Image: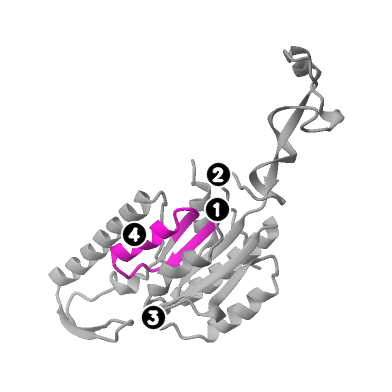
Amino acid sequence: MTETLFYRLPWQSSAVYPGAHPGQMIGAGQLFKRHEPLVASPDPRRIDLRASVLDPFASYRVRVYQQQSTVNIYLLADMSASMGYADKKQTLLQFLQAAANSAFSYGDKFGFFGCNDHIEHRWMLPASQQSGRVPTLLEQLERHRFTGTANGLQHAAAFLPSRRSLVFLLSDCHFPLSQLRNLLGSLQGHDVIPLVLWNQDEYATLPNWGLISFQDMENNATRTLFMRPALRQKIIAAYQQRQHDLKHVFRAFGSEPLFITECYSTQTINRHLQQRGV
């Protein structure tokens, strides 16, 4: 059974459809928003006598409430060759299923865009409440071999709606920081939650001594190094610096990244989601 992601919005949705999130619309709800003239909101059941008596124009005042609204949820996924390493692909599939099921349980629409060198039509799932499309997408992704680079992420914003949406960005971010800045700049109209997938085997489990070959999964370039304690520590320090640099870039655009370095855990992601806006 897939666990639910308890995402919450630190902003108000502008959607007109009733849902589970704070909205800008006026309608059925529990949270008082303001008073309005009866002619503007003709519902005599909500007349506030005290506010009406105090009105200097002697008009009836009506209490109006904030409507809970829906929001569009998107998963923007990096499907480059480096994302096929170790269990990254499996984490992507698990999160895709959890995010989709959670969106549908909230009454929200869910969409997916998978990117490598480009954005192919088969990896584009426009936002909707049709849950039957997700199992088919999961089967196709399970059989697909991730290849190429993550350059297609740069074009994803063109396929997103102009209305503010919640966008999960799932990637290992093994591309230049300038490319990441351009990507985040194009997504500034949306609420972006970065999930950075790293595998500790990439750097933390390297031996202290011995010959070891490294291969760049995106351009197939290989390099053989003679490992020694000083070089091992240098590689680990480089990853730590990379993490620091990524956090700095994400925070500059108002997003706090979650680094997932172990197996997929809905509880870990939920803790991160609940800390937003605290």
Q: Percent position (x, y) of residue 68?
A: 69, 45
Question: 10 Å neighbourhood of mark 4: few (<14), some, or many (≥20)?
Answer: some
Judging by the rendered image, the residue that carries numbered circle 2 is 11
Residue at the spot 74% in from the left edge and 13% down from the top edge:
54
Q: Percent position (x, y) of residue 1?
A: 66, 68
The answer to which quarter of the image holds residue 107 is bottom right
Q: Is residue 276 above or below residue 183?
A: above
Say which element carries label 1.
loop
The three-letter amino acid code for the residue at tag 3 is Ala
Disc nearer the start of the sequence (2/1) = 2
Residue at the spot 41% in from the left edge and 52% down from the top edge:
256
Say which element carries label 2.
loop
The answer to which quarter of the image holds residue 217 is bottom left
Q: Examine the structure image and report whether residue 174 is included in the region drawn in magenta.
A: yes
Question: Disc 3 to disc 1, how far (Cα)?
Answer: 30 Å
Q: Percent position (x, y) of residue 204?
A: 29, 69
Judging by the rendered image, the residue that carries numbered circle 1 is 164
Which label lies toward us, 3 or 4? 4
The three-letter amino acid code for the residue at tag 1 is Arg
Disc nearer the start of the sequence (3/4) = 3
User: In the image, 171: left or right of 47?
Assistant: left
Residue at the spot 54% in from the left edge and 77% down from the top edge:
123
Question: Disc 3 to disc 4, how far (Cα)?
Answer: 21 Å
Judging by the rendered image, the residue that carries numbered circle 4 is 181
Which label lies toward us, 2 or 1? 1
